[in-house]
Amino acid sequence: MESKPHLRVTRRQFVTNSAAAVAAGTLAAAFTPSAQAAPATEQDPEGQRTDRGPFRVIIDTDPGVDDALALLLAMRSPELKIEGITPVAGNVPLDLTLPNALRMVEIAGRTDIPVAAGAKMPLVRRLVTAAYAHGENGLGGAVFPEPKTKPIAQPAAEFIRAIVRKYPGEVTLIPIGPLTNIATALNLDSELAGMVRGIVLMGGSLSGGNITPAAEFNIYVDPEAARIVFQSGIPITMVGLDATRKTSLTEDHVRTLEAAQNPVSQAAAKIGRNAINHNRELGFLVGPNMHDSLAVAAFLDPSILKFKEYYVDVETTGELTSGETLGYSPRAGDLRRKPEMEKQAAAMNMSIRGSAPTLATTRTSPVLRDKFVPNAKVALDVDSAKFFNLLIGRLSASAPA
Ligand code: BDR
Ligand code: CA
């Protein structure tokens, strides 16, 4: 992997100066189910842990209050070589998510990062937005100047394809909005999935939804796209509501951000304070969840979360349940066995079944996969304090020189 000496030096200074003082040696080598448990660390000559970054990533996003903070976190994380940012319609329409992404790039002083406009609509559905949670402008009502920076001419899906092809096996996609851009890129090029290093996404839930009882918002908005992504064969880390619901921004967090005198912390504080006030007006007892920052954090430091392997599929035809993510596992719910029999159970080739056949179809229950093969590591728990140390610490720290 190409190394950037100047970036290495500033990363070291940056991490040393960071109020978070998070351990910088825990970035996963790749997000394959087996590799994720083995962080890509090595010892430098002084015996300190170092990672082998910077790692190439593309952030696909629909800013969005929590997207905005996630973007700022990513741009303040020297382990990441952000190849591009690809806004998509989601929380608000594309004509707001695109300028919001450009605003974040300008605030972070990172106009070197290409921003490529993505899909205006989900693959086959009408767009459902979440202005009720993110405000009409997508940033919880926090107002920032019109961005001067322009997006690149290339559309997001083509851009994603070009970058992944340019660096085969090196690029991790971090989608934190509906998966329309990612699915469109995969649809453009049947070889692309095999060249993506991994996907670390915010989306889905194995414990109930937020926009419907079944579905989490990002998957609900474009379930067909999500299904393409989950069935792509790309190693997936799913950071869904099971974990993100445990991350509420507090007054204390905002005060820490306000006290730090840098443009990133000030912008994050402004967005955070508006979002907390908005939550209060709606009667919520806690501040907004930092869903999307947690996905970025999962890439930076997987030890923040606890994961379990599942075969995840997406409901696309339900009248009430479209966008639901189903997690199949031989080690879940009623299928739990004595620990010593777990391997044996997995070896029993548990099939992945769909709904019972109707009279109009076949006699047999549809088998979607004839044996259990996990396609995702699903985050089931989070060390919330450790996560906020990372998030608030990095947003508060001064920018690297
Ligand atoms: C997800 O939906 C959006 O509203 C947030 O930005 C996050 O990506 C949470 O369900
Ligand atoms: Ca989002």
Image (tube, grey):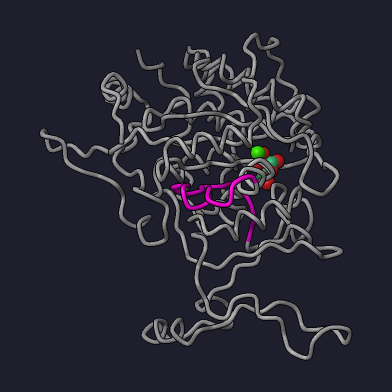
Q: Does residue 189 belong to the magenta stretch?
A: yes
Q: Is residue 93 left or right of residue 59?
A: right
Quarter-of-image position of residue 277? top right
Residue in front for this viewpoint, 120 or 75: 120
Magenta part of the chain: 188-205
The C terminus - image quarter: top left
Q: Residue at 69% of width from left, 51% of height from top?
A: 225
Q: Is residue 286 visible?
A: no
Q: State yes or no: residue 233 in magenta.
A: no
Instruction: Classify 20 as above or below 283.
Output: above
Residue 400 or residue 383, whichever sits in front = 400
Q: How many marks?
A: 0
Residue in the image at 34% along x and 36% along y: 22
Residue 196 visible to the viewer: yes
Please determine whether, in this image, residue 358 is positioned above or below residue 127.
Answer: below
Q: Residue 1 placed where, x, y %?
A: 30, 36
Picture quarter containing residue 228? bottom right
- Front-most of residues 81 and 10: 81
Residue 24 relative to residue 386: left or right: left
